[in-house]
Image (cartoon, rainbow, N blue to C red):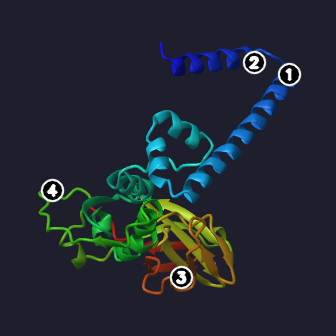
Amino acid sequence: MTKLEELIQEINRFEAIVAEWDESQRCVVVGLKRAIEALHKVALMRLIKSLKKEESISALREAVDDEVVYGVLLYHELVKPPKPPLSQRIQTAIDEVRPSLKSHNGDVELVAIKLPDTVEVRFIGTCSHCPSSTLTLSHGIEQAIKKYCPEITKVIAVENKPIINSGNSGLTSPFYQNRNPPWVKLTTVDKVPESGVLAVNFAGNSLILHRQGVKISCYKNACAHLAFPLDKGTIENNILTCPSHGFQYRLDTGECLTAPDVSLQSYPVKIKGDKVFVQLLLKI
């Protein structure tokens, strides 16, 4: 057994003994431990400073290559922990935004890393033809990648190749445009709060209804940014703020005030008596 292994075993033995003491006794030991560690850290900082003054950087680097020296310096936060590979950090960033995309049947995949500063990604599923995919890229995926990989300055979405789908599950019939979408009753007027929103689910569609006076508007319950639900957002002066990332929308028009190029997906509304009907394009 090496001297280092003996020292580690000795430390573990004392820690096990102290763990059995009462809190007041442990506090004394912890306080002593912190004071000794602080003294060691100051000594190490002065040693590093002296080596730098003497222009002995090569000697310092050689010392840090020793795993024990590196471990002690890392413990005292005097060196940075090793950075994971670029590909791993990019994948971590993509995994961070993936749940929000998958919740709306979309996804994104890494296509290529083009050193020194560019990453190419591809949208999958509903994200591949979503009108707000550019916004999703710049405000979601790009921000996440740059957070984990500051050396990356460009995130580019590459085009999908045309895909022929042999089935029609989840696809809108090509002949559907020749028929009028059905009007479905969602609620009654009194249930839609004045100057507020009512969340309604119908046949897999998550919607929000807004009433201002006698006018009722209907939108998809999904932020144009990363499609997070909007029904829990705050409303002030007829402006709805997304609770997830703060994107703001005018509830009378669906216009996005944060990114004017996109807007909420709206649906036609008509009122018969006290009943609220919405025209939905159902999928077959």
Tag 2 secondary structure = helix
Q: Within 10 angstroms of label 4, few (less than 14), some, or many (20 or more) residues?
A: few
Q: Quadrant of residue 135?
A: bottom left
Looking at the image, the residue that sits furthest to the front is 54
Q: Which mark is residue 100?
A: none
> In x, y percent, where is residue 136?
41, 71
Residue type at mark 2: give it. Answer: Val
The CA distance from mark 4 to mark 1 is: 71 Å
Residue type at mark 3: give it. Answer: Thr
> In x, y percent, where is residue 105?
35, 58
Residue at the spot of label 4 = 167
Count of number-bearing discs: 4
CB-based contact (under 8 Å), mark 2 and mark 1: yes
Q: Which mark is residue 258?
A: 3
Q: Within 10 angstroms of label 2, few (less than 14), some, or many (20 or more) residues?
A: some
Disc 1 vs disc 3: which is toward the camera?
1
Disc 3 vs disc 4: which is toward the camera?
3
The CA distance from mark 1 to mark 3 is: 57 Å
Residue at the spot of label 1 = 25
Residue at the spot of label 2 = 18
Q: Quadrant of residue 107?
A: bottom left
Residue type at mark 1: give it. Answer: Gln
> In x, y percent, where is residue 133?
35, 73
The CA distance from mark 3 to mark 4 is: 38 Å
Residue type at mark 4: give it. Answer: Gly
Mark positioned earlier in the residue sequence (3 or 2): 2
Tag 3 secondary structure = loop
Q: What residue lies at 60% left-to-right and 66% top-to-bottom?
A: 243
Query: With 252 as the anchor, is 83 left or right in this view?
Result: left
The CA distance from mark 2 to mark 1 is: 8 Å
Mark positioned earlier in the residue sequence (3 or 4): 4
